[in-house]
Amino acid sequence: MNPEPLILTVAPNGAYKQAADHPAVPLTPQALAADARRCLDAGAAMLHLHIRDAAGRHSLDAEGYRSALQAVRAAVGDALVLQVTSEAAKVYAAPAQIAMVRAVRPEAVSIGLRELDTPAIGTAGLADFFGWLARERVMTQVILYDLADLRRWQALRADGTVPEAPWFLLFVLGRYSVGQVSSPHDLLPFVAAHTGAEPWAMCAFGAAEHACAMTAAALGGHVRVGFENNLRLKDGALAPDNAALVAQSADIARCLGRPLATAHQVRARFGG
């Protein structure tokens, strides 16, 4: 049996990182475009991007997203899947997050389940939104921070609130640990509780990102790396840019005999 291609995603900026954290954090559409090109060349198939407002703060502005997506697409063509975030980042509430996704109608989006699973949305609202995502064939990655999130997702799938579709899960390691420090061991409870119904990836906060990525890839999962969660190379040195983190994970795939997925393969798998 041929090994499953590894989907390597880069998250180059996040909602909070600034130039003071690292001068290579891309904060403008032009910087995102240049970074995307380097990460593509290093092996990435998907870009998970955040945008900023004029003051450098996290934004879910639909027009801002359109401008950033246009700039990145001009740099990479269709060689990267472009995934926007709907992250609240302590700024947005669930109705505004959903409204942005509907307005932009992106190729791909990441959705924090616990951010949308609120009284303001309710079960009917969740069913309506996830049904829309499925009908519109938006490649949707569902972000899960702990086992409670995973079990809630499984319950929503079992009771039909979330319809059948090619969903993609993201297990987040270390987001709510002390000092946001992750370990490869943090992945094991997710994998043990996962039913295997949907493919999954992991991202990990802190300097153990590379070790977590290696564990995920060895267990058949997929990998997201980048400055959003970690600024360090596997040897502890400050990474020069996002592409260096991508290249490390591409090396993992080669060591494990897993080919790197292309954007075309990602789209074929998730129906975009």
Image: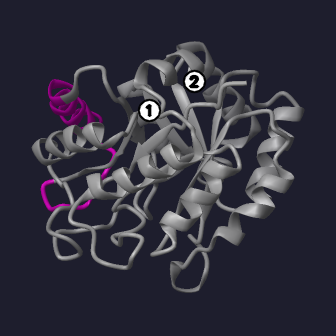
Q: How far apart are labels 2 and 1 at the CA level?
A: 9 Å
Quadrant assignment, res 229: bottom left
Rendered location of residue 75, percent (x, y): 15, 30
Relative placement, left or right, of 148 versus 37 is: right
Q: How is the image coloured?
A: one colour
State the residue at coordinates (73%, 24%).
1
State the residue at coordinates (21%, 65%).
240
Residues under numbered marks 2 and 1 in contact, where contact means CB atoms less than 8 Å apart: yes
Nearest the eye: 111 or 76: 76
The amino acid type of the residue labelled 2 equals Leu
Q: Residue 101 carries which label?
A: 1
Asked if 246 appears above or below 71 in the picture, the reply is: below
- Residue at label 2? 133
State the residue at coordinates (75%, 30%).
162
Q: How many labels does the image show?
A: 2
Rendered location of residue 186, percent (x, y): 69, 69
Judge whether residue 243 can be spotted in this image: yes
Around disc 2, counting alpha carbons within 10 Å, would you say few (fewer than 14), some (14 to 19), or many (20 or more)? many
State the residue at coordinates (37%, 39%).
44
Mark 2 or mark 1, earlier in chain: 1
Nearest the eye: 166 or 5: 5
Element type at marker 2? helix
Asked if 145 appears above or below 77 in the picture, the reply is: below
Quadrant assignment, res 55: bottom left
Asked if 124 appears above or below 147 in the picture, the reply is: above
Relative placement, left or right, of 183 versus 188 is: left
Q: What stretch is highlighted in magenta?
A: 54-75
Relative placement, left or right, of 168 versus 66 is: right
The amino acid type of the residue labelled 1 equals Val
Q: Residue 74: within the magenta?
A: yes
Element type at marker 1? helix
Rendered location of residue 14, percent (x, y): 35, 58
